[in-house]
Structure formats: structure tokens, C-alpha cells
Amino acid sequence: MRVHALWAGVPVALVLMSPNVSADWAVNLPRGVTEVSQSIYHLHMTIFWICVVIGIVVFGVMLWSVLFHRKSLGHKSANFHEHTLVEIAWTIVPLLILVAMAVPATATLLDMYNTSKSAVDIKITGYQWKWHYQYLDDKFGFFSVLSTPQDEIHNMMPKDKWYLREVDKPLVLPVGEKVRFLVTSNDVIHSWWVPDLGVKKDAIPGYINETWARIDKPGIYRGQCAELCGQGHAFMPIVVKAVPKADYDKWVAEQRKQAEQLAALNSKTWTMAELMSRGKDKFDANCAVCHQATGVGQPPTIPPLKGRPITTGPDPSQHIYTVIHGRPGTMMPAFGKQLSPVDIAAIITYERNAWGNNTGQKVTPQEVLKAEQEK
Amino acid sequence: MSAVVDTHAEEEHHAHGPAKGITRWLFTTNHKDIGTMYLIFSFTMFLLAGSFAMVIRAELFEPGMQLVRPEFFNQMTTMHGLTMIFGAIMPAFVGLANWQIPMMIGAPDMALPRLNNWSFWLLVAGFVLLESTLFMPGGAPNFGWTAYAPLSTTYGPPSTTYFIFAVHMMGISSIMGAINIIATILNLRAPGMTLMKMPLFVWTWLITAFLLIAVMPVLAGTVTMMLMDIHFHTSFFNAAGGGDPVMYQHIFWFFGHPEVYIMILPAFGIISEIIPTFARKKLFGYTSMVYAVASIAFLSFVVWAHHMFTVGMPVAGEIFFMYTTMLIAVPTGVKVFNWVATMFRGSMTFETPMLFAIAFVVLFSIGGFSGLMLAIAPADFQYQDTYFVVAHFHYVLVSGALFGIFAAVYYWLPKWSGRMYDETLGKTHFWLSFIGMNVTFFPMHFLGLAGMPRRIPDYALQFTDFNQVASVGAFLFGATQLIFLFLVIKTVRAGEPATAKVWEGSHGLEWDLPSPAPYHSWTTPPVVD
């Protein structure tokens, strides 16, 4: 008996000793910060309590029978095996409960599908494995990429509070305005989900799905991709930063200015050191999930970049071509559509000079631009 | 009639026992031998797929990537699902059907014995093909058992082709098995056994067999279109070529939802056999049970898109599939109420089959409740693709289908082997399974509601605690299944002799045969009433 108690203590101790300070025991849906998320929450709680009540009645009768109608107590079995009235009742009553439940559910559904009269339109595109946000009215856009360092994922440094739930650039939205999301994908199916907004919509290549949210209060709301999309599925979080309208307008103006500056970077003359430093950041954010931070890849599915003819040969043109156009039929995507010429140039320069690939070659944004135009 | 029986009896003189050695198993056309092979195969696959689940739970014990790479993790979730569904649960039911249906309807064997042999060995071949992908360059399929395009087509690993052919072989095997079961039930029933006198296990299998014949060709069509997209550059599911990834999901779930019922209806039948035996009281509402199963089977064809509430269907479609899905709760409720009414004012004892049956009713109902919650389309936008769904279908498949299978094995093992199992060991197996199952899957409801998506190898810190609880439960549940293996071996080798009736309250033709049941079940048909 004592030995058994000891063994039972093992799992309990394991759980108690877990070192993660920010872990919690959340057990329910969040109420969220939109009207839709709150109606969903109420539907959820209503159907939950209906189930609880039915459960108590059914399991109660069962428990009663198990406790008292047992042979060991000398209980003799009764002889009935049909009762038309009871059988009709337990068909009709659940049906009525379901009809009562269907009415508010249908109302919420119609509300969720009403995407008209939006103030802000944002196109969300899923990529393996990051999100792109395009502000359609203001003509700028950006990628939002996981910012958790690879070292945290591989347990080589302590994990941050927002481990796997942090991005380099959040989606900024105005509070109190109806925002319409147009959701699509560049490659496989993803799903854009932020529980606090009550929004989940699949991002499907060839489709543009519509949904919307009107956020009630400023704050940071986190979610992540909900549809299996390959090996980086766990590593494409969503961070929404909701700010008052005035702050939002200011932020949009800044973004438009930055977009112009970014375009200017493509014509600037870059030094080797500048390209290498920018290249490392961009490589870690865009390429390291597959090719690994050390360039060793994951053979045989994902080839190494370290010491390969394509990354160390005298002519970089094939290397540039592959990064821009991808490798059809493999997991290598076409980055020409995803990254600016300067970032592609920086990544290629980095790949040709890191991990002992010391070619000493520099690839400039102008070369990349030229290769993109040549097709 | 008597002349036919006589000729048969004469043949009996020449071949009355099983062949010796390996040929007995390779070439057998005997329903009991084939049933045994199905059950052994199923348990082997159960342990294999279970070990994949152990890899999943070990990796998820802590946040961060510890044991495996995300790529391999995805292979594990995929192979766990495929192997459990097509390798463990479905073949177990076919094994039970093979053993029981001829005995329960008063037949000597299945109607199509050679087909029976072929459908078993084809299944084995299909699984050798499927599991071999684990050793291939590029690894096993990694796109989930649902194999959504284009992740499984344009972006799939080279082994996808092997997956497709394996699915074809399993499909052909299932269809042949289903044809055999229908032919047996419709043609070989004992004189006097009208359809409405058939045991419920036979009824549920008859309906399940029709479901199999209806939907396995749909699955075969789906994977064939994948094959075409991968190798012959068609664009069924490729948006860039005018195809439609959402169409894949519609066709897949047109198969997939009836498939869910294929895995639970025979368990309904088993529970409807066991509860009356141990309550020592006739099954309540036999007729309504039969109609409930038939309505569930019919409804299963018109609810498929509730797996796809978030794909962007038009609102009219959402409403249609929400209403039909909610409707399934009515016949399912009728079944649960009938089981409870059977127990009510009975004279119950609690041997291992009854324990599994009672746990089935309670835990399957919990799975049904979460299913009802998932049917509410607006709420499903929050539940879809989270651990809430994982919790839901494991309550239905582990404490539903699997507990039903365990209940059946404990119930009929004395009849098959002629020996009683060890009741203490059986109860230990039950209680540890019951605790392990709930510790594993109950916290997953919370994880899903708190926002953890399914099929991820690594998670945010707030999900740590419940994941650790779930992993501990999973290891307990996994280890417990070895008790069952030990128990069955012990019973077959050294169990106490069983009587023909085995249980005090047993009812039905199989209990009129001696224990162990003779090699050819009913050489002379019994007369019912």
C-alpha cells in the first residue's frame, strides 16, 4: 500500500516541480473583446450548462441503479422493456432543447457573416510559416514573423513569458472601428485565429475568405495558426495590437513613410558588413526553420547550404535564381514575392559567407532586382 | 433440406479440424481463425499506434523541442491517426464480426469464406506498405490522417504515393469484409430469426457494412485524385490549375463522417448485448434502438461539412450543417436513455465487461456532449482545430470504440477459448485504463478552450501544466494495455474452464454452443422460437 502511494506521488511531484513560472490553469474560453467573441462565449456557456444538466439527470439515474439495483443487495430485476410514452418524451424533449439552442446560434452566425460597411480592410496572407498583412486602404504591408529565438526553442536559453506567442511586427488595428479581414494563402492551407477577437478563418490558396472584428478595448491579443501547414505550423503566431483611432492614424502615416524608405534601400550601395548583419537577421527569420541556423539543413528533405556547390561556386546566379523562384515540387518557396531585393541580397550574401562558405562574394540589391526582372 | 444437411455432415467426417502449421493461418477460410487473426493484427497495430502516441506525449511533456524534430512529430500524429483508425479500431470490429456473427445468427461460417481470407491478408499487405514509409528517405506521411490538399499533394513527401496505395488496399479489404457480412446476415440466419429478432450487435454491423460500402469508394476516389495531382499533373485540388483545395475536404469528409460512425455503431451493438446480460433484464426499447442506429447512419451522410465550419462556406451551408448535426443528438440520446433504462431496476453485477460497458455509456456521453457543443457553428469557430476537438474525438474513440472492443473481448473470450479470464486482472486493467484515459484526455478540453491548437510539436508556456498532466495519464494508459496482453495469454494458456453459458444472465444463440465453440459453429441450424 505504501509503495502504491509513493508511485502515485510521482506524477503529482512532476507537475508541481515544473519550472515554468508563467504557466496557468486556464480552463475556459476567453470572453474576448468583440461583440462576436462575447456572443460566442454566451452560446458556449449555455450549451455547456445544458449538457451539465442533462448529464446530471442521466448519470444520476444510472448511479442510482448502480448503487441500489444490484444483485449483491438482493435486488430482483423488473420485467419491463418498453414504454411508448417515455420513449416519445425523450425524443421530443431533446428536440425542443435543440430548437431553442439553434435560434441564438443562427443569429450569431448571421452577425459573424455580415462583413459589410467596414472602415478598415486588411488582406491577410498565410505563408509557410509566417503571416503577411496588407493594409488595402493605405497601400502598405509587411510580414509578421515569429520573434522567439531558435535558442529558446532548442532549450539553450530560458524561455520568455511570450514564448512562441511573439512576433517581430504585430498587426496594428484601431479600436472601435469595423475591420474587415480578407484571408488567403500563398501555399498550403493555414488558419488565422485570435481567440479574443472570436475570429478564426482558414487561409486557402485560390480563395479569399472574409471575416471581421470590431475591438472594444485597446490591448495586445495573441493567437496562432490553427490549421496544420507543415513543420513550422507551431511557429507562426499572430499578435494583434489594438490602439485608439488617433494612435492608429499616426502609426499608419509612419508606416507609409517607412515603406518609401525601404524602397530607397534597394538603390543604396551596401558594404559587406552591412549585408552580412542584415543577412543573418533575415536568414534566421525566414530560412532557419528549414535550413537550420547553422546551414546544415535536414537531409534528405531539406538540403544543407553549408559547403554546397550552389552556395560556394564562383557564379552566384543559380543561387539567386533559386531564392527568387523557389524549387517547384519541393518545399523551397519562391521568396521573390515575399522579400524585398535588399533582403534577398543580404540573405544570399550571408549564405555565401557564413558557416565556412567563405566565398568573399557580395550580392547587391541591384543584382537581385535585375535577376527578378529577367525572370 | 435434410438431404443438404446430411451431405454436409458427411463432409465433416473428412475435414473437421483446422489444418496444421502455418498453412492453417495462411489459407484458412474459417471464420474463427480469420477472426482471431483480425484481433491479433488489430492489437499489434494498437500497440504500434500507441507507441506513436507515446512519442507525441513525450515531446509535449514540456515546451521546447526536446526529443524529435517538428517534421518527425507531424509524421507521428499522422501515423498514429491512420494506424489507430484503419489498423486497430476497424479491424478489431471486423474480427469481432467474424467470430460472433455466424454464432449469433446460427450459421456454420461466413457466407463468403475465401473472400474473407483475402480481405484479411490484403489488409496486412496494406499496412506493411503504410508502415514501411517510416523507413523511407523523406519520412512517412506528415500531413495528418485527413491528408488535406495541397499540403499532401504539392507539398507532400515522396512516401505519399505509398500512403495512397495503402489506403486503396485497406479500402478494398473493408469493402470485401462488408459484402461478406451483409451476405452472411441476409442469407445465413437460422430459421425463425427474422430481422427484428436479430441481436443488436448483428443489426449494428449490418448497418455499418452498408456505410462501408457507401463511403470506402469515395475515399478511394479522393486519394486517386491526389495520385493524379502528384504524378500526372492534373489539378483537382491545385488552385493554380483551376482546382479546389476545399473540394478535397468536402469529398474527404463525405467519407470521413460516416467513417466516424463505422467506428462506433458496432460498439453500440456490443454495449446493447452486454448491459442486459449483467443487469439480468431484457434490453429496453429494442425497436427504438434499431431505428436509432438506422437514423444515425442516415444522418451521417448529411452532416459532413461540420468538420469545415471555418473554411468560408456560405452562411446557408453553415446553417444547414449546423441543424443536421444537432439533430444527431436525438437518436444518440435515445440510445443512451435506453441503456440507462435497461440498468434501471435490474439486478446488476459488475464483471469486467460490465465495467467497460458502464464506462462506455458515461464517457461516450461526455464525448457526445462535447460533440453537441462542436455542432453549434459559431462556437465551433473557437473550438475548430484545437485540443477541444482532440479531447472530443478521443472520448468517442477511446472510451467509446476502444472500451466497446475491450468489453466485447472480456465478454466473449470465455466462449472463444473455453477458459475464464482472471477477474482481478481484468478489473485492474479496467480501472487503470479508466483513470489513465480520463487523466489524459479530460485536461485536453481545457487546453483547447484556452487556445492550444492541435497538431503542434511545441506550445506557449501557459499550456504547460495541463500538457504534463495529459502526458502522465497517457504513459499510464499506454503501460496498462500490456496488462491486457498478459491477461489474454494467461487465459488462453491456463484459464479455468468456462461453462457453455459463461454468464448467469447471458442471452442469445452463441451461448447455446459449447465453450470453446466448435470449429464450424452451427453445422445444423438451430430453430429460433
Image (spheres, coloured by chain):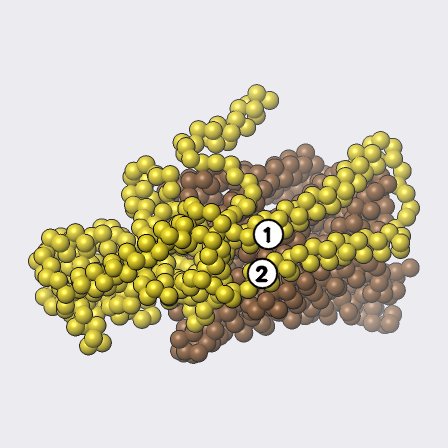
Badge number at residue A39: 1
Instruction: Report the amino acid beneath label 1.
Output: Ser
Write down the quadrant of residue A99 in the picture. bottom right
Residue A232 higher or lower than A17, as above or below: below
Chain letter, colour yellow in render: A
Q: Residue at x 66, y 49 (%)?
A: A47
Q: Residues within 10 Å of mark 2 (few under 14, many from 20)?
A: some
In the image, what residue occupies the spot 84% across and 59% down? B287
Chain ID for brown: B
Determine the secondary structure under disc 2. helix
Q: Which residue is mark 2?
A: A111
Q: N-terminal of the two: label 2 or label 1?
A: 1
Q: Secondary structure at mark 1?
A: helix
Mark 2 and mark 1 in contact? Answer it, CB < 8 Å: yes
- Closest to the observer, B50 or B457: B457
Q: Looking at the image, which is closer to me, B83 or B248?
A: B248
**Which amino acid lies under the numbered mark 2 shown in the image of this protein?**
Asp
Q: Is residue A49 visible?
A: yes
